[in-house]
Image (spheres, rainbow, N blue to C red):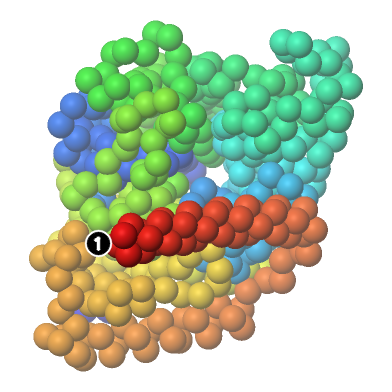
Amino acid sequence: MIFRTLIISFSLILSLAAKVEQPNFIFIMTDDQGYGDLGCYGHPTIKTPNIDKMAEKGVRFTDFYARHKCSPARASLMTGAFNFRVGVGSIVYPNSTTGLIKEVVTIPEMLKKKGYTSALIGKWHLGHTAGYLPRDQGFDYYFGVPGTNHGDAKTHKLPVIDGFKPSGDFTIEDYWADKGKGVHGNSTILMRNDKVIEWPTDITQLTKRYTHDAVRYIKENKDKPFFLYFAHGTPHHPYTVDAAFRGKSAHGLYGDMIEEIDWSVGEVIKALKESGIEKNTIIAFTSDNGADSKPNKDHAEKGSNLPLKGWKGSSEEGGVRVPFVVSWPGTLPEGKKTNEIASLMDIFPTYAALTGIEPKTPQKIDGKNIFPIMMCEPGVKSPNKYIYYAGNTPKITGVRNHRFKYSTKTSGLYDMHADIGETKNVADKYPEVLQELQKAMEVFQKDIDENSMEAPFDEGQAAYVEIKNKKEKSSKDKKEKTTSKKDKSSKKKNKK
């Protein structure tokens, strides 16, 4: 079976190479969007006609994995490696002065070997200081927010454009002093290439501005091969949307954001058609992790991970399994669905295979070429034997194969085909499967421990974590004191 799969994969690549020498790549990623937030994934009220049309004209994955949080997911996408291998554990914190390890080879750096130009429009979140920005990691053009869409990232004295003037009541002295940083929405800086062009920026306008810039980029680069990484900052809180979309969705403000994103996808596809390059472009849509369990503080609506269990930040399926739709008119089949397992790490090697590049990288590549399963040919199985789960630290907490998932958190084995909601432990029924997955996890843990690049020491991140831990401890102590007082009060009442 393995030999037959390799033969089919090789023949697919050969036929593709003869048809399209250098396809364009567009990768669209949202922020904290749930598995069930799209019409084509079953949402009952949010309308996503453009993304649904992509699925009708392309392939929809049901078992596609990101990571549990923003930065780890983006690191895995950019490098093809499990995020711990490249210096990114949890999110790149506001006080962090580092980010993705500089020496790694990223997708744009790899594609340069074949003459590709590249752009990142939107959220980076792999380093917001000089030396760790998108153009330091291979992108030719950048327009977006280096940290989070909702602020919380210090400028660390990033350079500004000529004639720079802060908006509102802020002054240039405030900018250099980092005044107002750390407050959601008030500290968001907007960059073009290596310089800050606005601070603070109006985050309600970012989706629209990103989209217009993406359309411009596509039309200006239609005559040469390009890679466009379009990373939205929504629907991550705080909920924000252009006035033209506010109040349009039956699912409140959260639905408005998803519907604005869907409009954006439609504009990108329209630009491809108008530029005459739709059939020479492979376009994918996904999210960086599952929906957040904590909605915007001013609004009750939130995202949906249904029918999965769990939320962003967890190793339950709702935290890490995300929608993935890919379309390539004239090449990929139409209206197909696949339940073969795949992940963000597979994008790097897939692009490499489609362009005929044999990348030489300092990081160990964990991803696999998934183009053959995108083609949905009979008998072709995922090249990924296992998918691994982990939290903020380099400790593997779970693993799944095509059918079963094992979690150290619950010590449970779950049948992903029969029990997508992880409700029934079947470890007693399949002891040999449990043993296989535990062994696989043990082997991969050893590999991570022995084959990860050394991340630079980061005093800023360490300080932030220390402050965060102190706050959490203080909060815990207050709760314990409150509980103790209630217990004492209850005892006094009982004595009376």
Residue 9 percent location from the top left of the image: 31, 64
Look at 61% across and 83% down and name the residue there.
Answer: 450
- Tell me the element at label 1: loop
- Relative side of 457 to 109, left or right: right
Q: Quadrant of the N terminus?
A: bottom left
Q: What's the amino acid at mark 1?
A: Glu
Q: Is 464 on the left-hand or right-hand side of 367?
A: right
Residue 154 position (above or below residue 451): above
Which residue is tagged 1? Answer: 340
Near-viewer residue (275 or 363): 363
Left or right position of 26 against 189: left
- Give the side of residue 31 with respect to residue 455, left or right: left
Q: Position of residue 203 (x, y in %)?
A: 56, 21
Give the quarter of the figure containing the C terminus: bottom left
Residue 197, can we see it? yes
Residue at screen point 51% across, 48% down: 70
